[in-house]
Image (cartoon, rainbow, N blue to C red):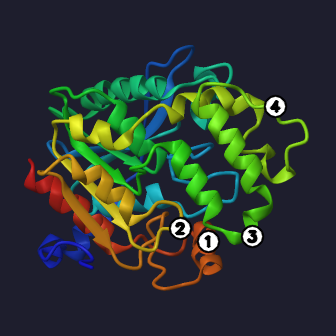
Amino acid sequence: MNRGYALLGALMLAAAPVAALADQPVTELSAPGPLAPLHGGLLDAGRGQPVVLIVPGSGPTDRDGNSPLGVKAASYRLLAEGLAARGISTVRIDKRGMFSSKAAIADANKVTIADYAADVRAWVQATRNATGARCVWLLGHSEGGLVVLATPDASDICGRILVSAAGRPFGTLIHDQIHANPANAVIFDQADAALAKLETGEHVDTAGMHPGLMGLFAPAVQDYLIDLMRYQPAELAAKSTSPLLILQGENDIQIGVADARLLAAGRSDARLVLLSGVNHVLKTVGDADRAANAASYANPDLPIDPGVIAAIAAFVEAKR
């Protein structure tokens, strides 16, 4: 498959300005939150340059793309530095209730996709105030793609960039992820029954549940899962009207190329980019086995695949 756009070479800048932009310090920003401000950081490529708001993926994922659950790939930080080197500013954020935005809500589990979309709206305004930008590009990674899709079209949104984002409803996605690993056969029946109940809006009794499922279906997160499962990402993508880029790695062991095609199916004007050898955290892993692919999640020294940065930069620049 095509690893990016043919004009990759034309997007490369001279070495000196690239280094200057990538090394520029991050400016702390805040946006209104429910109980206290939300916090994030701006990597500014210069006044008048395009600005991309990076919306994090699921769970405790911080503004750099890392998680205390073992993810240390620093994908969002590396992406921001790569885009800065191409003259594109970025704002990276901590979700409400987590990390520097912890005080914004009393319980980080008491959120909905609509809440996160409201926070995106707050960040768009804060970003415009800080940069003077007419509009802001929304980039959602993984579950952040659904948040971006759930954010209504508005004149101050330049467009949407969905990176490693699900096209299937999340109940189906979780089912397929569990069943993709034959070693999970012992939990198939319990997982399927729990998902079926949650999809109807019912809570699940975790008493007697296999320990391997306790984290996924913990009572504290069931309301969030119920809300999450009611969304149809492909339908939201089809209804959106702003420019749309869908970018998917072909060696992603969490989200598949079929998801990207589902997201693109309802928008004839969407730009779909498939990147060979790229995984969920946007690293180049080639044909590595599942264990080696997963190991890259903990490696911040492994760079972002250059095709990721080139595709995003080309799309943003073409739509200016």
Residue at (68%, 30%) from the top-left corner? Answer: 222
Horizontal arrangement in the rendering, residue 300 relative to residue 241 (left or right): right
Q: Earlier in the sequence, mark 2 or mark 1?
A: 2
Q: Which residue is mark 4?
A: 205
Q: How far apart are the alpha carbons under marks 2 and 1?
A: 8 Å
Q: Nearer the viewer, mark 1 or mark 4?
A: 4
Q: Which residue is mark 3?
A: 183
Counting from the top left corner in percent of width and height, residue 260 is at: 33, 58
Q: Which residue is mark 1?
A: 294
Identified by mark 4, the residue type is Asp
Q: Up-down: is 267 above or below 275? A: above
Q: How far apart are the alpha carbons under marks 2 and 4?
A: 29 Å
Q: Nearer the viewer, mark 1 or mark 3?
A: 3
Q: How far apart are the alpha carbons under marks 4 and 3?
A: 24 Å
Say which quarter of the image contains residue 79: bottom left
Q: Tell me, yes or no, whether the two marked residues, 2 and 1, touch with CB atoms within 8 Å.
A: yes
Counting from the top left corner in percent of width and height, residue 304 is at: 41, 70
- From this viewpoint, which residue is outermost toward the top? 35
**Secondary element type, mark 4:** loop
Q: How far apart are the alpha carbons under marks 1 and 4?
A: 31 Å
Q: Which mark is residue 253?
A: 2
